[in-house]
Image: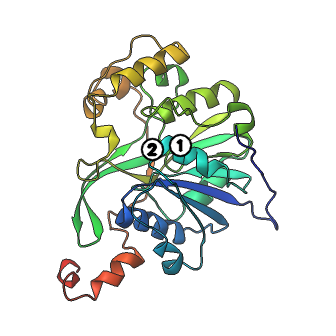
């Protein structure tokens, strides 16, 4: 494990280090950075690890108010390696994980920081959304709430932990080490299971993270044919027994999953998050017609 230089933040507000791996999703990651700029809590170190994809350095110019640390990987090493690279740059007491195509509503980080008192890791409920792309902005076409009781035994059968927007104490990695690069799929489930064995993990009943689920964006959750070996590896590692490989949406209709559905606070009005990158194109004669 590489040496990690955890530093205490100055002042009374703890520093939150946000790790974002990205690969060829310039428009999507721009929306995520916009959503971070809109946060009510702004003491953030934002670490963007570009996994040898198209350049994203333009984000520094677009968002000079934010502390953006952009790392360009020399070769495409895939998302788990990229997250581990991000860990080496963390300066905050807390770490927040985000996928580059997901979004956070404005009060998300402030709420997570309040909720983590007395715990080691917190995760929120989410709204899952499909979308169409208009110009350089995604607009939701379908959405549904993903909110389930925190039941560790049940989550060994079907994980309802969503890593995007989860907040945890940086010191967890002192025991847990890096993210497991052998878990290209299910790295987040593996991380949750390792964390909950040694630390206090809590669900926060608010759907303040928005999780993109679409074939358009190449979301890995929509792929199934190559996931079985990783599921078997996860099961062997944690003693989970035989696990199903059904479609994600089909699994949500299983009785044991339906029985865990929980109440949550829904905050999103469904409006798109328009990034400064999108606004740049808005005035162009070619793309202007795509915006309203």
Residue 281 placed where, x, y %?
A: 30, 82
Residue under the image location 47 percent in, 50 percent down: 75
Q: Quadrant of the N terminus?
A: top right
> Do labels 2 and 1 touch, CB within 8 Å?
yes
Which element is circle 2 on? loop
Whether 233 is drawn above or below 181: the answer is above
Whether 204 is drawn above or below 283: the answer is above
Residue 269 falls in which quadrant of the image? bottom left
Residue 46 placed where, x, y %?
A: 59, 62
Q: Is residue 252 left or right of residue 162?
A: left
Residue 142 placed where, x, y %?
A: 23, 53
Residue under the image location 40 percent in, 74 percent down: 275
Residue assigned mark 1: 81
Which element is circle 1 on? helix
Residue 177 placed where, x, y %?
A: 68, 34
Whether 135 is drawn above or below 215: the answer is below
Residue 44 falls in which quadrant of the image? bottom right
Residue under the image location 68 percent in, 32 percent down: 176
Residue assigned mark 2: 78
Q: Is residue 86 left or right of residue 138?
A: right
Q: What label sits on residue 2 in the rendered view?
A: none
């Amino acid at each position: 494990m590489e040496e990690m230089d955890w530093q205490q933040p100055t002042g009374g507000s703890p520093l939150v280090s946000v790790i974002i791996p990205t690969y060829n999703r310039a428009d999507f990651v721009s929306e995520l950075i916009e959503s971070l700029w809109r946060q009510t809590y702004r003491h953030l170190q934002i670490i963007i690890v570009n996994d040898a994809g198209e350049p994203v350095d333009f984000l520094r110019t677009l968002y000079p108010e934010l502390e953006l640390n952009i790392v360009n990987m020399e070769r495409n090493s895939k998302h788990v390696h990229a997250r581990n690279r991000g860990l080496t740059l963390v300066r905050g007491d807390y770490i927040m994980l985000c996928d580059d195509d997901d979004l956070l509503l404005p009060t998300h980080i402030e709420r997570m920081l309040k909720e983590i008192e007395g715990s080691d890791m917190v995760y929120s409920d989410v709204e899952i959304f499909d979308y169409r792309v208009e110009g350089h902005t995604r607009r939701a076409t379908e959405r549904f709430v993903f909110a389930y009781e925190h039941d560790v035994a049940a989550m060994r059968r079907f994980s309802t932990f969503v890593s995007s927007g989860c907040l945890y104490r940086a010191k967890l990695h002192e025991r847990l080490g890096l993210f497991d690069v052998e878990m290209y799929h299910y790295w987040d489930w593996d991380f949750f299971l390792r964390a909950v064995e040694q630390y206090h993990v809590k669900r926060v009943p608010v759907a303040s993270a928005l999780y993109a689920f679409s074939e358009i964006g190449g979301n890995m959750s929509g792929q199934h044919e190559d996931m079985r070996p990783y599921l078997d590896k996860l099961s062997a590692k944690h003693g989970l027994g035989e696990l199903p490989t059904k479609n994600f949406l089909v699994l949500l209709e299983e009785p044991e999953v339906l029985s865990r559905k929980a109440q949550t606070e829904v905050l999103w009005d469904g409006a798109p998050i328009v990034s400064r990158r999108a606004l740049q194109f808005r005035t162009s004669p070619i793309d202007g017609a795509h915006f309203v």
